Amino acid sequence: MRSSIRYTLGVATVVSISAAPSPAAGQAASPNACSLFDAAELQQLTGRKDILGKGPQASSPSDLPKYMSECDFLEMSFTLTSTMTPEWFARNRQQSEARPDRWKVQSTSGLGDEGYYLWDPRPGQYRSVGIVFRVASNQVAIGSMVPSDSVEVMKPKLLTLAKQVIPRLK
């Protein structure tokens, strides 16, 4: 399993690559995670500003498996896994649920084939919160770091953003 953790989504990114897809998977070209959202829409939805003026930043393809891409923008992380099976998705969720001391998982509906929120429930200054969903063979994980008392405020924003991403996967 890859050991690095994205600063905004924590385990959702690590879990999404914990099991390798079949060898035939991942050979078809898939969209880049940066193509899943419109930068202006994201700024409007989150109320955040691109203070560095760099726009969305794609992770280097050499840092990731061929079936995955990542993009960071406005202190948010987008991870696209293009070879996701229902079984792999379920296994990833179960791995997070198996760590209730570290991760809280809550189902959500209306997101492609299946989806859930994932957040760090421990008290503290900043905690990871994300939404993970699957549309056909694509899994998208969107996450951010927020003050621990703002997780519930961020979840509806993530849901709105996820609903905007789904048409871009088809």
Image: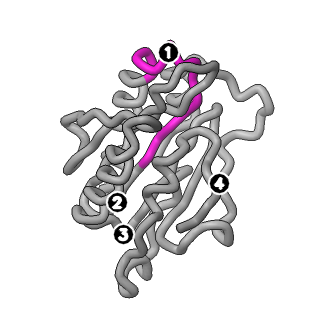
- Near mark 1 (Cα within 10 A), the count class, few <14, some 14-19 or many ≥20, is few
Residue located beneath label 4 in the image: 58
Taking 105 as reference, is 151 left or right? Answer: right
Label 1 vs 3, first from the N-terminus: 3
Magenta range is 141-154
Percent from the top left, x then y, of residue 138?
Answer: 34, 60
Q: Are marks 2 and 1 in contact (CB under 8 Å)?
A: no
As measured in the structure, the alpha-carbon distance from the residue carrying label 3 to the one carrying label 2 is: 6 Å
Residue located beneath label 1 in the image: 150
As measured in the structure, the alpha-carbon distance from the residue carrying label 2 to the one carrying label 1 is: 28 Å
Tell me what residue is drawn at x 69 percent, y 40 percent.
55
- Near mark 2 (Cα within 10 A), the count class, few <14, some 14-19 or many ≥20, is many
Tell me what residue is drawn at x 61 percent, y 48 percent.
6
When asked about the image quadrant of residue 70, the answer is bottom right
Regarding mark 1 in the picture, which secondary structure is present there? helix
* Three-letter code for the amino acid on which mark 3 is drawn: Thr
Q: Residue furthest bottom?
A: 23
In the picture, the quarter occupied by the C terminus is bottom left
Label 2 vs 4, first from the N-terminus: 4
Residue located beneath label 2 in the image: 138
